[in-house]
Image: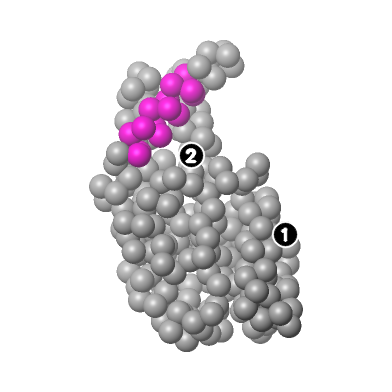
Amino acid sequence: MARTRLVVFDLDGTLINSSLDLCNSVNAALEHVGKSRLPNELIATYIGDGAAMLVRRALADPGDADSGRHKAEGEVLFERAFHYFLEYYREHKLDNTHCYPGVLEALREIRKRRPLLPMAVLTNKPVIPSHGICDALGLTPYFFQNYGGNSFATKKPDPEGLLALIAEASAALRHEDHSAAPIDPADVVMVGDSDVDVLTARRIGARSVGCGFGLAPASLAMAKPDVMVQSASEWIAALGI
């Protein structure tokens, strides 16, 4: 196994269980624009590709008789729903959201064993709520960077954000040790709960650890991560630390 020199974590479904607050926010937005609520179990399958896509998928639910409305009208509806979703979620993002069991303990153990190992967050969630949640739940001190879905022109599975993190971590290492070699993608591990995270890693030759306890176990299994874990306590072994 290659030596791990950078670990990048997804947020929702990996570090935190945010499903209920996201589902409640989606349903609040649907009701705001006069549409029917959706089951939480269905909304949860829409999570992972950013806030805008989450709302678009909810609005286009096949069970909705209005899903075929004119495209222009649909865009107006989307803008109303999306704006309300963002406002509602801003106020309610921590109502029920919490770290998965063992997450903080695992991060502490990684830091204890590898004090200089850079770790970061790369999520498709908008960056402001991502930072707010990580601050509130005590996650922020473990990461040198926290990029969201609006930090770049692209979102995962495009590897732009992951490549930026590799460049930043490499620069920081060289600042501490001028002889340090740049971080190779093969020495990077992306930890996430969906096919999006696996594909992000795969596109640059990085390794992936799949979190089967997250929000998208079916798509994750189909993507075939390099290692699959069922709890955060298994991260240490999966990372080879």
Q: Residue 130, percent across and down? A: 43, 50
Quadrant holding the N terminus:
bottom right
Q: Is there any visible trace of residue 225 in the rendered image?
A: no
Q: Is residue 68 above or below residue 171?
A: above
Instruction: Please give the residue where the numbered disc 1 appears in the rendered image.
Output: 203
Report the amino acid beneath label 1: Arg
Q: How is the image coloured?
A: one colour
Of marks 1 and 2, which one's residue comes earlier in the chain? 2
Residue 189 lies in the magenta-colored region = no
Instruction: Please give the residue where the numbered disc 2 appears in the rendered image.
Output: 51
The secondary structure type at the circle numbered 2 is helix
In-image side of 225 versus 47 (left or right): right
Residue drawn at x 39%, y 64% is 139
Task: Decide whether the magenta segment is chiefly helix, strand or loop.
Answer: helix
The secondary structure type at the circle numbered 1 is loop
In-image side of 192 versus 157 (left or right): left
Callout count: 2
Q: Residue 171, percent across and down? A: 67, 68
Residue drawn at x 45%, y 61% is 14
Looking at this view, is 183 or 61 the one in front? 183
As measured in the structure, the alpha-carbon distance from the residue carrying label 1 to the one carrying label 2 is: 23 Å
Residue drawn at x 66%, y 81% is 177
Report the amino acid beneath label 2: Ala
Looking at this view, is 204 or 137 the one in front? 137
Quarter assignment of residue 27: top left
Residue drawn at x 48%, y 44% is 126
* Magenta span: 77-90
Looking at this view, is 238 or 228 the one in front? 238
Q: Is there any visible trace of residue 34 in the rendered image?
A: yes
Residue 85 lies in the magenta-colored region = yes
